[in-house]
Image: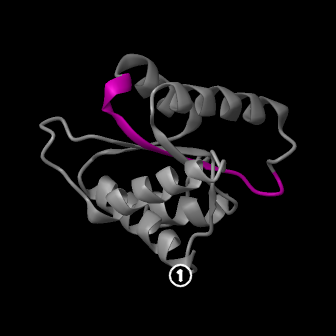
């Protein structure tokens, strides 16, 4: 399981470098609405502070449903702060890291082995009826 957490971190960093990363619930919803075919992978993040937030849970339910309907691999992480450190600016500050989308590059040339590993992990998890598997991100 630690390996898959490292793969997620690598895929997020790689997508960020390729300008193929969207961060934020509303920003992600906009991408899903405007260009649904570009979405490759979805990460939902919460922690104890946010898990009772009804509005966020409704957003998560809608995003999950969209991902299922459009064959988009989706995972959860339980440490939003750590996710924000990975995808945020140099100070690791990011207000809304509850949802991150990895999109395909405009020319379709970007391929990432870590992302392929994540897709396979999600496919195997679905085979075990774990539709939104939880991944633990590696510590610093």
Residue plotted at (46% across, 63% down): 8
Looking at the image, residue 129 sits to the left or right of residue 37; the answer is: right
Label 1: few (<14), some (14–19) or many (≥20) C-alpha neighbours in 10 Å:
few
- Does the magenta portion include 87? no
Tell which of 121 and 115 is nearer to you.
121
Q: Tell me what residue is drawn at x 38 percent, y 24 percent.
A: 36
Q: Secondary structure at mark 1?
A: loop
Residue 139, by quadrant, is: bottom right
Q: Residue furthest bottom?
A: 140
Q: Nearer the viewer, residue 103 or 68?
A: 68
Q: Is residue 55 above or below residue 52?
A: above
Image location of residue 55, percent across then percent down: 78, 29
Number of residue marks:
1
Horizontal side, residue 106 vs residue 76: left or right: left
Give residue 107's position: percent from left, percent from top. Answer: 12, 37
Q: Locate residue 56, reporting x and y percent.
A: 74, 35
Q: Nearer the viewer, residue 73 or 17?
A: 73
Residue 41 on the magenta segment:
yes
Q: Tell me which corner region of the image, top left, top right, bottom left or bottom right, holds residue 58.
A: top right
Query: Which residue lies at the image location 70% right of the left edge and 60% below the top edge?
Result: 78
Which portion, as a residue range, is magenta? 36-49
Q: Quadrant of residue 133?
A: bottom right
Task: Tell me if residue 89 comes above or below residue 41 in the rendering.
Answer: below
Looking at the picture, the colour scheme in use is one colour
Residue at x-position 21% and y-position 41%: 105
Farthest residue to the right: give it: 52
Position of the N terminus by quadrant: bottom right
- Residue furthest to the front in view is 127
State the residue position of label 1: 140
Give the answer, above or below, for where 16 lies relative to 90: above
Q: Position of residue 34 (x, y in %)?
A: 38, 18
């Amino acid at each position: 399981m630690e390996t898959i957490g490292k793969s997620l971190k690598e895929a997020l960093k790689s997508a960020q470098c390729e300008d193929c990363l969207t961060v934020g619930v509303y920003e992600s919803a906009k991408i899903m609405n405007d260009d649904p075919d570009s979405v490759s992978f979805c990460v939902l993040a919460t922690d104890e502070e946010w898990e009772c937030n009804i509005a966020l849970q409704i957003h998560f339910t809608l995003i999950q449903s969209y991902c299922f309907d459009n064959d988009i691999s989706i995972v959860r992480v339980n440490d939003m702060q750590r996710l924000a450190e990975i995808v945020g600016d140099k100070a690791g500050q990011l207000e809304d890291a509850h949802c991150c989308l990895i999109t395909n590059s405009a020319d379709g040339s970007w391929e990432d082995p870590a992302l392929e590993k994540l897709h396979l992990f999600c496919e195997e998890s679905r085979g075990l009826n774990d539709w939104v598997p939880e991944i633990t991100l590696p510590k610093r």
